[in-house]
Amino acid sequence: MLQKKLEQTAKHFEQSPVRESWSNNMNLGPLSESIKPAMKSIDKDINTLIEKCQTPLKLVIMGEVKAGKSTLINALVGKVLSPTNVAETTASIIEISYDKNANGTIFTTSSNENIVGTLDEIYQTLDQKRTDMDFFKNVDYVKLGFPLKSLKSLHIIDTPGLATVREANEKRTESFIQSADVILWVFNGHVLGQADIEGKLEEVAMMGKPIIALINRVDELNTPADKLVNYLEKKIDIYVEDIMAISAKSALEGKLEGNEDKLRISGLLELLEYLETNIERNSENVQTHSIIQSSKVLIEKDCLFHDNINEDIARVISDLDVRKNEISFFNENIKRALQADLKNWFELEFLEREKEEMMVKVKQLGIFSKTRESKELSEELKDILSEKALERQLQEKYEDIHKQFMTKWERASAELASKIEAEQQIHYKNNLASLQMKLKELDSRAPSGEEALLDGAGKGAIVAGTYGATAAVYTAILGPAAASVSLIGAIGAILPPVLLVGATVGAVWKAITHKNEKNKFAQEIKTTFSDVKSHIEKQYLTSVLEGIDTESNKMANAIYNQICQHVCKNEDIELLVRLKQNNENYIRVSKMHLLELEELKEKVEQPIA
């Protein structure tokens, strides 16, 4: 029943919207990349728990060097399985399990180099290589199989002493702890309290596994066993389920010799009764309880990661709304400034100097000017109001407007880029800190199966997943946006009214040749300039102002789109919105799985009172 439930959970994980997004190479940002290794570990751990439903109860032996772990294993099994201290002298992890044929395997980090042989051959190899550190760096763990009935329902993992644990073995030990059901932590009674092991005890206890503390070698001490137990209880009681005093050496001798007195005083019978009552008789319940606890935490962590990605998406959507309002503010100000500048220029500067100069020349004409002088004045007026002259002035102003346009949008983009970068960094770090805190809370109350999750989503990921510098954000925003906008092209295509200008100049020439009153002549000049400006204003200035409005709107939209691409990592915002909705549905189903596991857990008796 439990196995089927876990298989359904594993199938549910496979249908995760986030995992599907990764398989489709969808970029969900630095936070997503930080938690990807942790989610892959969840997939691995749920499959480990499924396999565990079919395996015997696993017992991990831990403790300090010379604590007597190997002797304890021999006493538990009732037979000298291997030379004592093999695990410590080789710094290797030894897995002891049932096999109908006595044999062993030295598993290496390169599977094609595994060493298989009889038990004696494996012992001989380990003994010959005991000083070859390069050899043991490549050893993953050693598995020994014995045709003993006592091992049919129990797997024993003998770990190296804490002082001899290598980094690689520490990770493998943690993996075995995850798959274990009970931990026997062996203390050397001679040095009780001298070694600072509370940190390691706390670390293992946080995995949610029951720990039984054993004070060994009490037969060699003068201090009463109950005092030793009381002393240790004060130091580590919060981490262990029970504390017992034993003599593994006396227990092994008692079993081998059939000496009931040695067995009785060794404390082994009390330990065996405890294991039988709380472990062996309820091994299925112990395993079920342990698996359910581990499975629940895996689901809770999976939900936590999906929640965090949803928070990230919600923040992106919220920030984009803020950016849209900011861009709209910049856009309206830029349009207003450019249009006001163009109107002022047109009203106060365009053709005004030329008109004043022309009026001065008119005043300098005699009362009855010669035809030649009038004709020269007329030709000068035609040059001033020619298509080429008007186009030159308008084009210069267009270029000035375009320069202002780009400068203003560059400043706006730089300000936006600075805000985006600062907010992204703050959000990323805060979200990551919150995630770490929640993960720590989960790890403190149940087995996680993967202590490395905090590293995968911790300080190392902050360095690897930081956003780009502000300059890079600015370039990403403005560059593509500017390429899609052409203000100078939009307004530069507007040319002066050639036919109108020609007709107006002709009218002035007619006035000059037929009228010789200077006041009327001056008025005709003013009227001509006024008509030209009026026509350009009505037919073309309006279009230029509309062009500024249109192109600035295009720039605003282009910048907003580029910001969307940047903060969404080139993903469609609608896809992110749908992902968020799918994640919410996924989390709802995940919580149903949690409820079903909780109901199953209530039917299972607690393994240790």
Image (cartoon, grey):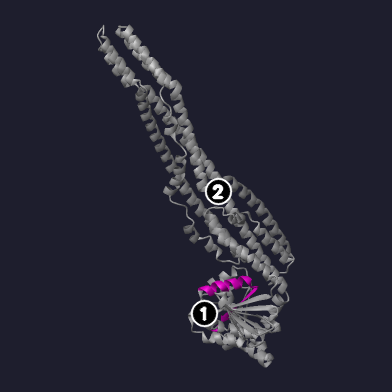
Q: Quadrant of the N terminus?
A: bottom right
Which residue position is annotated with label 2? Answer: 571
In the rendered image of this protein, does residue 519 appear above or below residue 202? above
Which stretch appears magenta?
167-194
Nearer to the camera, 231 or 159: 159
Nearer to the camera, 220 or 402: 402
State the count of labels. 2
Left or right: 223, with 469 as reference point: right
Left or right: 196, with 253 as reference point: left
The amino acid marked with disc number 1 is Phe
Please tell me which of labels 2 and 1 falls first in the chain: 1
Q: Quadrant of residue 531?
A: top left
In the rendered image of this protein, does residue 37 appear above or below residue 477? below
The amino acid marked with disc number 2 is Glu
Decide whether residue 574 is among the magenta residues: no
In the rendered image of this protein, does residue 89 appear above or below residue 468? below
Residue 592 is situated, as x and y percent measured from the top left of the image, at 70, 56
Q: Quadrant of residue 486?
A: top left
Secondary structure at badge 2 equals loop
Question: Can residue 406 be seen here?
Answer: yes
Q: CA distance from mark 2 to mark 1?
A: 48 Å
Q: Quadrant of residue 103?
A: bottom right
Which residue position is annotated with label 1? Answer: 136
Residue 215 is situated, as x and y percent measured from the top left of the image, at 59, 81
- Are the residues tagged 2 and 1 within 8 Å (C-beta)? no
Q: Nearer the viewer, mark 2 or mark 1?
A: 2
